[in-house]
Amino acid sequence: MDIFSFFSLLGGLALFLFGMQYMGSGLEKASGGRLEQMLEKLTDSPIKGVFLGFVVTAVIQSSSATTVMVVGFVNSGIMKLRQAVGVIMGANIGTTVTAWILSLSGLEGDSIIIQMLKPESFSPLLALVGVIMLMICNNSKKRDIGSILVGFAILMYGMSAMSAAVKPLADMPEFGELLLVFNNPVLGVLAGAVLTGIIQSSSASVGILQALSTTGMLPYSTAMPIIMGQNIGTCVTAILSSIGAGRNAKRAACIHLYFNIIGTIIFLTGYYIIDAIVSFPFTDSMVTAQGIAIIHTTFNITTTVILLPFSRMLEKLAYLTIRDKQSTQAELKNDANLLDDRFLATPTFAIEQCQNVALNMADISVDSIKRAMKLVGNYSESEAESVNESESVIDNYEDRLGTFLVRLSSRELSVSDSKIATRLLHNIGDLERISDHAVNIVEVSKEMDEKHISFSSEATHEISVISSAVNEILDRTLNVLKTGDLEAASQIEPLEQVIDSLRDEIKSRHIDRLRDGRCTIELGFILADLLTNYERVSDHCSNLAACLIKSNEQSYETHKFLSELRDPSNAEYRAQFNQFAATYKI
């Protein structure tokens, strides 16, 4: 094997890794985040967790990605540690699918069926179809399918390049002598673990081993401990991912490591004991790509069957390793933790999490403004402090969500995900401003309480009417954000205009009372502040609804849109305005 063959091996490995990543990315986008949502919601039993872990990993072609995702779920509080155990076991089984796909290249026979089953026969056709779809299709789903096909073809080309590069090793007796060293189980396990830890992919390291098997110089006795080590080495990704995370996230990574280490000890001990008694006939035979896939699958299934009943013990072992401190208040669940950096690797699911956090933010903003409005004429210091605390929480939401969305926008997003990310970036500013107005209203209420002043019965009635209108626009806006109902969104602006009219009417009536001596200038200033905050809140509600409508058109010119909507010739708008105006009459 000369230096050029070595370069070919490295090039084949690079193409293999790129193809796997590109195919996995296409599969993840095509799933639309549904796989991650399944993991999040459907892991209430260990067996179900194993099945879901298998399915997700088989689809996205990466047990490391699945495990890192699970670490993120546990860290954010979405998934409990005991739920993670089954998913991790299932991920180990799911990663064997790659080995079986790669083993197809080792099929032997002259029949057309066998020849067509070989990846080198059909992958060029898949590459052609995939490239055509990427070039001519505008539909994002079809482009995702094209990415999957191209990624698979590149992966298989990389596998073929690696196999061709190592073929000369078959004529090198030194290589055979080197492989004999790894007959020692400990050295074999270490070699597999180190290789996988370096390239961060058990599928890739198994692929390299399958490529080496084409030399016909790799016996089963050498391949078996290396495969066991490869399963241990894949834990490195999850361990690195857990650095800086909460204790439960670290425990999830420990469970992944312990599962593979204990499984390796049990499997190899059982194998060598039985081999010493009955002497397996295949031990000194040369392993094939199919043989490697069989060992890989047998190990992971056997280990899962043995250890699944002891999943609680694995959990306790993780707790013994990562112990709780005296105080764990800092690790109490926080909705902002839903924006775990690990989710950036799966943009579609990250977008889903951003939407959930934005809705939580909207709930808190709406609740705080409603509580603030109740303090007008009925001030409570404890309730005022609670509203102010909510505003601090909202500020934290805006900072965390905005930063996360900016980072997410730099990733490769689908058209629909990019549209959602842009809309959310617009929304969080309006939601934060609503909570600011809640604080302003609290200050107005506090001033009235400290100065022992109150509105007249007429002004109190007028404020109750506009307060009801503001409450309705808040409820409607919150519902629009949760449902995405465009028709309901179009009804926000007419109500906002009614609130503007109420503000003007109340101000006009106050001037009349001032002239008649039935009100004071001081109360007029307070009333003006209050009405301004109410009107601004309704403005932000209008912005939120208009942003949702325009985002479907991939346009964010909301002011122009609202001006066109209020055109006198818009009969539907006028009808809705008149209906709201009739409801909220002073």
Image (tube, rainbow, N blue to C red):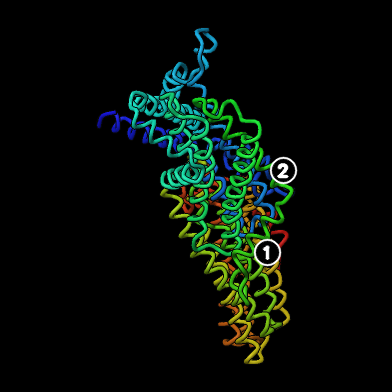
379 or 382: which is nearer to us? Answer: 382
| CB under 8 Å between discs 1 and 2 | no
Q: Is residue 370 above or below residue 288?
A: below
Q: Is residue 136 visible?
A: no
Q: Nearer the viewer, residue 449 or 184?
A: 184
Using the image, tell me which numbered label, if any, was put on residue 551.
none
Which callout, 1 or 2, points at the residue further toward the start of the chain? 2
Give the image location of residue 358, x and y in percent. Answer: 58, 58
Q: Residue furthest left?
A: 3
Give neighbour class at mark 1: few <14, some 14-19, many 20+ (Cα, 10 Å).
many
Closer to the camera, 564 or 350? 350
Which residue: 46% across, 35% down? 20
The secondary element bearing badge 1 is classed as helix
- Decide if residue 156 is on the left or right side of residue 228: left
The residue indicated by pointer 2 is 48
> Callout 2: helix, strand or loop?
helix
Query: On the image, which quarter does residue 53 sit in?
Result: top right
Along the line of sight, which residue is nearer the eye, 22 or 172?
Answer: 172
Q: Is residue 208 left or right of residue 369?
A: left
At x 60%, y 76%, the residue is 389
Q: Residue 469 bears which disc, if any?
A: 1
Residue at coordinates 53% horizontally, 36% vertically from top-left?
224
Quarter location, residue 6: top left
Displayed quadrant of residue 96? top right
Indicate the amino acid at tag 2: Lys
- Residue 42: image location, x then y, percent: 70, 46
Q: Residue furthest front?
A: 277
Quarter of the rendering occupied by the N terminus: top left
Q: CA distance from mark 1 to mark 2?
A: 48 Å
Percent from the top left, x then y, of residue 515? Answer: 60, 84
Q: Position of residue 173 (x, y in %)?
A: 34, 28
Q: Tell me: residue 493, above or below residue 302.
A: below
